Image (tube, rainbow, N blue to C red):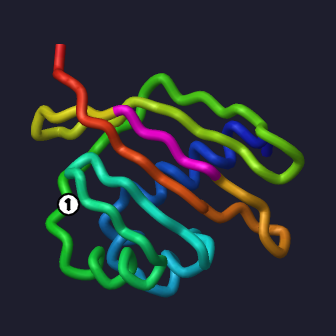
C-alpha cells in the first residue's frame, strides 16, 4: 500500500467512534509526545489526556476531502485535508505522522474551523 493510501486509512480510522472510544487502539495510533490544537480552541497536551477525553465523547460522523500527503523527511509526513461533519460543520485539518518501531503514529493534529459554503 502506498503512503498516501495508508495515512488516509489511518485518518479515517481516527474518525470512527469505535476507534475513538478504544483506548488500546488510540495508544497504538498516537505517539507518546502527541499534542492537538482542536477546532474547538482546546489544546490537548498529552496522549493520556486525549485518550481519556475521547472515552466519553459525543462524536458526529465526518468525511474527508482534499486529502494530501507531503513527506517532510524520511519517516515523517504532513497530512492536510478538509473535514465535513454530517451536522453541517467543516474544518481544515493537519496532522504530522512519524514512523516509530515500524508503525506510523500521529505526533500532532490541528483543526481550524471554516465557513460552510
Residue 57 location (% of width, % of height): 20, 71
Mark 1 sits on what residue?
A: 59
What residue is rendered at 31% in x and 53% in y?
38
Residue 99 location (% of width, % of height): 78, 62
Magenta residues, dominant SS class: strand
What residue is rendered at 84% in x and 43% in y?
73
> Residue reaching furthest top?
117
Quarter that holds the C terminus: top left
Is residue 59 part of the magenta span, yes or no?
A: no
SS at mark 1 in the image: loop
Tell how many labels.
Answer: 1
> Residue reaching furthest right?
74
Up/down of 63 relative to 34, above or below: above
Residue 91 location (% of width, % of height): 29, 34
For residue 95, side relative to residue 97 (left or right): left
Residue 102 location (% of width, % of height): 84, 69
What residue is rendered at 60% in x and 28% in y?
68
For residue 46, side relative to residue 102 (left or right): left
Camera-nearest residue between 106 and 23:
106
- Examine the image and state in which quarter residue 79 appears: top right
What residue is rendered at 54% in x and 56% in y?
108
Quarter that holds the N terminus: top right
Q: Residues within 10 Å of mark 1 (few under 14, many from 20)?
A: few
**Magenta residues (range):** 92-96
- Examine the image and state in which quarter residue 51 appears: bottom left
> Residue reaching furthest left?
87
Camera-nearest residue between 79 and 45:
45
Amino acid at each position: 500500500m502506498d503512503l498516501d493510501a495508508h495515512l488516509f486509512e489511518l485518518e479515517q480510522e481516527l474518525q470512527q467512534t469505535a476507534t475513538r472510544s478504544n483506548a488500546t487502539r488510540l495508544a497504538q495510533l498516537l505517539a507518546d509526545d502527541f499534542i492537538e490544537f482542536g477546532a474547538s480552541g482546546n489544546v490537548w497536551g498529552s496522549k493520556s489526556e486525549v485518550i481519556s477525553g475521547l472515552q466519553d465523547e459525543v462524536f458526529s460522523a465526518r468525511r474527508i476531502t482534499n486529502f494530501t500527503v507531503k513527506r517532510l523527511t524520511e519517516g515523517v509526513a504532513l497530512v492536510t485535508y478538509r473535514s465535513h461533519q454530517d451536522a453541517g460543520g467543516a474544518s481544515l485539518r493537519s496532522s504530522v505522522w512519524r514512523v516509530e518501531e515500524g508503525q506510523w503514529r500521529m505526533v500532532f493534529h490541528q483543526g481550524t474551523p471554516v465557513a460552510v459554503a
